[in-house]
Image (cartoon, grey):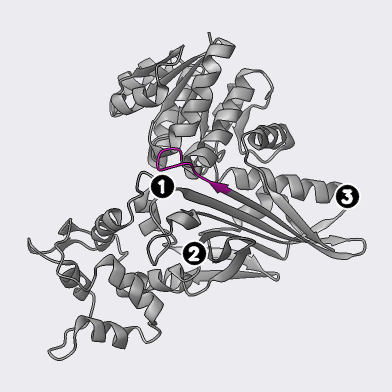
Amino acid sequence: MPTILLFGAGKSATSLIDYLADSCGDRSRKLLVADIDTALAAAKLKGRVHTETVPVDLEQEDSRQQLIRQADVVISMLPAGLHPILAADCLKLGVHFFTASYESEALRAMKQEIDAKGLLFLNECGLDPGIDHLSALKIIHEAQSRGEVVRSFKSYCGGLLAPESEDNPWKYKFTWNPRNVVLAGQGMSKFLEHGEVKLVPYQQLFKRVETIHFPGLGDFDGYPNRDSLNYQAIYGLEQVDTLLRGTLRRAGFCKAWDVFVQLGMTDDTASLQLPNGSTYRQFFNTFLPWSDQLSVEEKLAELIPELDFPTFEKLQWLGFFESKLLPRTEGSPAQLLQAILEEQWALQPADRDLIVMQHQFEIQTQTGIKKVTSSLVDVGQDAVYTAMAKTVGLPLAIAVDLFLKGEISLRGLQLPVVPELYLPILDALEKEGIRFEERVVD
C-alpha cells in the first residue's frame, strides 16, 4: 500500500490533509501525519480510514528516518529551513519529496544525486510559488506555440481579507506566518523594466508601489518581490523587456508600513531589553528623537513629513499612542512589533480571508501588442478553512495524488513549469473552484 508521510499539520495544511485523507479510502493508500501537536493532526484527520498521526522528534535523525522509511512520498509543510534536512533524509533513503516552498540552494546541490536515483523532488507547488507558475506558464507556452513573443510579464499575489472581514483601517490580519510578513521585502528587490535591470533597496520598497485593480474588489498596492530576474530563464522569457513578480496589499497599507521601515521597527538584528511594564507608546518612542517639548505624535509628524491622516489612523488603531502594556519586552524590534501585531491582527473564528493573484501580459503578435490580464480571486470559509490553506495545500495534494496514480512520470529536481505538471494540476484545481478569469485587449 503506497504511504504518504506529511510533516506539519499547521494552518496551511488543512486542505492538503483533507484532500489526501479523502483519497485514502478510495485508492488504497495510507496517510501518516507527523506533527509536534498530535492532537491538532488527529483533529484534522477526523479518524478517516487509512490515516493516522505519528509522533516525531525532528532533531533526532533516527526518529525522522524511521518514519521516512515507511513512506513512498514525503511532503514537508514545515518551515523552509527544515526542508533540506528532510530532503537529505529522503535522498539517502530513496523516497520522493514534495514541498510548496521555494527551491533552495541546498536542494539544488542535491540535483545530480536526485536525478541519478530516479526520484522526483518537486518544489514550489503551492500558491506563490506554485499556482502562479501553473497559470502563467500555460499562457506563456500557448503564446510561444503561436509564434508570439511575451514582451512584458508582471505577476502579483496577496493573502488578505474578504471585504466583509476588513474591520480595521489596515484591512489586514495574519492569514499565514506572521514573521514572514514582518520581515517581508528585506534585502534588495530586483526586476526588469523596459529592458533595464532595476534595484529597489528595502528603505525604498514600500514607496515604489503600483496600483493593481480587481473588478468588484477595488485597488491594491503592489510592490516587487526580492528577485524576479531568476524567473526569466525558468519561464523561458529571454526576449522579455519587463519582468516583475510582486506582493499585494490593500491600497494605503504600504504607505503606513513604510513608517515602521523608516523608523527601524522591522529590524531583526538589534536586541532590545525594555523595562517590565513598558507600553506601546514607550516602545514607539524608542525609535523617535528625544525632545523635552514635542509629544510622540509631534515628533513622528516632524520625522515623517509625508505622514497623512489615513496613515496616522492606522498607527493609532494599533495602539502605538496608548499606555497599553507590551506583550513582549525583550527581542529584536521586529520580534516586538510582531508580538503586537499578532494581538491586533489575529484572525477571528468567523473571519474570511481572500487570495488575489493577477498576471499582466503584453504579447507581441503578428498584428501588434495584445494585453492579457489573468486574475484569480478565492475567498475562505472561516479562520480554519482559509483561502490561504486551500490555495497553498491543494496544488501540492493534487500533485502527490497524480504522482501516486502514475499520471506524472517526470523525475529529478523539478518545478511545476512543464505541461506534464501544470496542465493536470490546473484541471484538478478548476474542479475545486480555483480558476482564473482572463481578459484580452488586442
Residue at x 61%, y 58% (from the top left corner): 229
* Marks 1/2: CA–CA distance: 16 Å
Query: At label 2, which amino acid type do we have?
Result: Arg
Q: Which residues are magenta?
A: 378-385
Instruction: Give the position of the C terminus as an image quadrant.
Output: bottom right
User: Is residue 41 at least partly visible in the picture?
Assistant: yes
The numbered mark at residue 176 is 1
Q: Nearer the viewer, residue 291 or 44?
A: 44
Residue type (three-letter) at the residue carrying disc 1: Trp
Measure how far apart labels 3 and 1 are at the Cα level: 39 Å
Q: Earlier in the sequence, mark 1 or mark 2?
A: 1
Residue at the farthest right position: 367
- Numbered disc in front, either 3 or 1: 1
Crowdedness near tag 3: few (<14), some (14–19) or many (≥20) residues, C-alpha within 10 Å = few
Disc 2 crowd, CA 10 A, few/some/many (<14, 14-19, 20+): many
Residue under label 3, please give it. Answer: 146
**Residue on which the image places disc 2:** 250
Q: State the residue at coordinates (71%, 38%).
A: 418
Q: Earlier in the sequence, mark 3 or mark 1?
A: 3
Q: Could you tell me which residue is drawn at 31 percent across and 85 percent down?
A: 301
- Position of residue 174 measured from the top left corner of the image (x, y, whole percent): 38, 52
Other residues around mark 1 within 10 Å, as few (<14) / some (14–19) / many (≥20)? some
Q: Where residue 316 sits: x, y (%)? A: 29, 72
Label 3 is placed on what type of residue? Arg
On whether residue 266 falls in the magenta region, the answer is: no
